[in-house]
Amino acid sequence: MDTITYRNGGFELEASVREKLNAHLRRIGLSGDKRMHEMLATTILPPIKQTADYVEWTKVFYQSYDVGNPALDSVRIAVDNPSMMALYTSPTGSVEFVRPGRTTYVAPSYKMVDAGLEIGWDDMASAGWDILGAKIKEVGEELARKRDEQGLAILDAAAETVSDHAPDTSGGAMTKAGVDAIFRAAATAGWQIKNVVINSGTIMDMSDWVWSDASHLWDMPRELGNSLLKDFYVSGYGGANWFAFKEAPAAKVYFAAEPAACGAYRWRWGGTRTATDINIVRRTDLYTWDEKWGHYWGNPYALWRMDITA
């Protein structure tokens, strides 16, 4: 199975490999031998790890860690506020010491998401890898989509915590003025925006930008003009990494400092758990996957969200 590769969002097989694999699946589909079906499961289940991040976009903002067992490997995040001070002249004429109190800790809460795949033996025998490979890919996409939902909820909550960190931009498009205002606010506050995530269609609004002297963005240096001609946007604007995903919200653009500065973490409890069984009554193979993820955002001051309104 080493010759099965994952490229451009799908599995690719050499013609000879596909022929052998389909013949193998046909034999298993026509057989009721439990051992053959179990051997297939141990061969097929691993590719889910190659597809699990296919549609995921919120992972850009988080540092990911694995947790073996929360009962033994508990995760605690220190929550503290600035407390130190410096004085030109102290009341007593000596150095004033500040003794911090006991630090407060928070622990992430985990949400489990699971997916199940049931493949009929007759379907396996007739369709072979075409159906099995496609459905495993879909499982990976669904797990990633659920992780995005969790990560997005934390992103939105953090952006709405601080005043003026979720400004509106009217006109139904991402404007240069709106983007520049966020970069200016970040620089004023002492944060450097490292990552920008935007919808792959919305980012094309950049092709309509004009500069303060009313000259069009197309009048920029040749290398930038070439980028606009090919992609309809300029990557690296503002010195940040711009990530375009078709799965990202079309009416929102997220700007953030690097994950370490944001205190943005996500933990996976116990990895991706897999299991398999066969149902001789229904004549099907059963596969399950489940994951438990916890997300946390510690510093909302280094995050902005632009809301694009009509």
Image: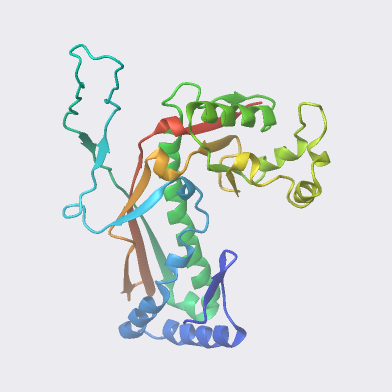
Please identify the quarter of the rendering in which residue 309 is found.
top right
Please identify the quarter of the rendering in which residue 271 is found.
bottom left
Residue at position x 39%, y 49% in the image: 63
Seen in the picture, residue 213 relative to 203 is either above or below; the reply is above
Please identify the quarter of the rendering in which residue 67 is found.
bottom left
Residue sitting farthest toward the top: 91
Residue 268 seen by the camera: yes
Seen in the picture, residue 134 relative to 28 is either above or below; the reply is above
* Quarter of the image with the C terminus in it: top right
Residue at position x 17%, y 28% in the image: 101
Seen in the picture, residue 56 relative to 99 is either above or below; the reply is below
Residue 184 x %, y %: 58, 28
Number of numbered markers: 0
Residue 305 x %, y %: 53, 32
Residue 175 seen by the camera: no
Residue at position x 20%, y 15% in the image: 93
Residue 264 x %, y %: 39, 42
Residue 122 vs residue 3, the one in the foreground: 3
Residue 270 x %, y %: 27, 59
In screen coordinates, is 291 left or right of 196?
A: left
Residue 223 vs residue 277, the one in the foreground: 223
Residue sitting farthest toward the front: 93
Q: How is the image coloured?
A: rainbow
